[in-house]
Amino acid sequence: MKVNRLISIIMILLDKKRISAQELAEMFEVSPRTIYRDIDTINLAGIPIRSTPGVGGGFEIMEKYKMDRKVFSTDDLSTLLTGLSSLSNVIQGDELVNALAKVKSFVPATAAKDIELKTNQTSIDLSPWMGNRNIQAYLATIKNALQENQLVTFEYADSQGNKTTRTVEPYQLVLKNSHWYFQGYCRSRSDYRLFKLTRISNLQLKQEYFTPREYQKPQLDMTDMMATMQTTIKIRIHQSVMDGVLDFCPFEEFTPDGDEHYIVNFPFIENDYYYNSLFSLGDKCECLEPPHVRAEMKRKAQAIAALYEN
């Protein structure tokens, strides 16, 4: 993990007079290019690192610079502790425990209560209320595969329930809209794919390793694409389902309609996901317009009712 590595590099530079990029790269099992980026990050954080070229050269903290616990402000330490604690709720591992311990070692006794208060003001719990119990185990497996450049195999179900067996080079874990994914190069499809962990079954680490290829990050910002696809429909909802509708649009789009109902300008894409989202509100939601969406809702409702006629 980058935060853990950065803190460890700072500790090493405090203990050693000078160390080369190659030594650091071998120590953390990353490329020298990654180490150079880490050094730039540490410099930007206000810790002056000097680079000496040639034989016997390397990185060192500038002479006469003394780093003490005051290098991190109260806000800095609170932010680090909040972030590391949130990850440790979901992803288990010694490196997270070590990183938390190292950050806590920078907390001065005089500021401990203030930092604890600030840290507790924000709670980020990424673990689910309920649901697929395999997710946490899968996160740990994929995390190991990422660290070791190790292939994984699994069965993957598409949106229609069709299963295929995949062999994948994992490159990144992604948390998006409260769902976990991982991005990898699928050898079965000869291309990069984003896999949703809830659709994975029988995940296994293969005893086979790969050389990382030029990585293509997934496209996660769909704002522009969604803007071209979305239309606005008008729905009437009961106040009891307001919370579910607020997940899709702000309260400014709600207009009171009597004592217990609202008319809502609802962002909509004509696909199963959005139709099912409206159906999930049951009889507390009615599509008012446009007519063709209202007609499709009626057709789908009739098809559901037909399942129970016999």
Image: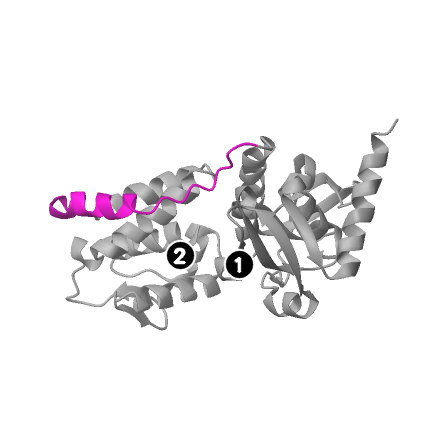
Residue depicted at x 47% and y 65%: 33
**Residue 16 picture location, percent across and down:** 26, 55
**Horizontal arrangement in the rendering, residue 105 relative to residue 213 (left or right):** left
The answer to whether residue 226 is above or below residue 174 is: below
State the extent of the magenta-drawn residues as a range.
107-130
Residue depicted at x 37% and y 42%: 85
Q: How far apart are marks 2 and 1 (CA)?
A: 60 Å
Element type at mark 1: strand
Residue depicted at x 32% and y 71%: 51
**Horizontal arrangement in the rendering, residue 70 relative to residue 141 (left or right):** left
Q: In front here: 59 or 77? A: 77
Q: What kind of residue is marked 2?
A: Leu
Disc number at residue 24? 2
Element type at mark 2: helix
Residue depicted at x 25% and y 68%: 48
**Residue 142 picture location, percent across and down:** 58, 42
Q: In front here: 141 or 295? A: 295
Q: What kind of residue is marked 1?
A: Thr
Q: Quadrant of the C terminus?
A: top right
Q: How crowded is mark 2: few (under 14 residues within 10 Å), some or many (20 or more)?
A: many
**Residue 147 picture location, percent across and down:** 53, 46
**Horizontal arrangement in the rendering, residue 99 relative to residue 295 (left or right):** left
**Horizontal arrangement in the rendering, residue 97 relative to residue 61 (left or right):** right
Q: In front here: 231 or 110? A: 231
Q: Name the residue under label 1.
A: 255
The answer to whether residue 92 is above or below residue 150 is: above
Q: Residues within 10 Å of mark 1 (few under 14, many from 20)?
A: few
User: Quadrant of the rendered structure where residue 161 is?
Assistant: top right
User: Quadrant of the rendered structure where residue 293 is?
Assistant: bottom right
Specify the farthest residue to the bottom. 53
**Residue 160 picture location, percent across and down:** 79, 44
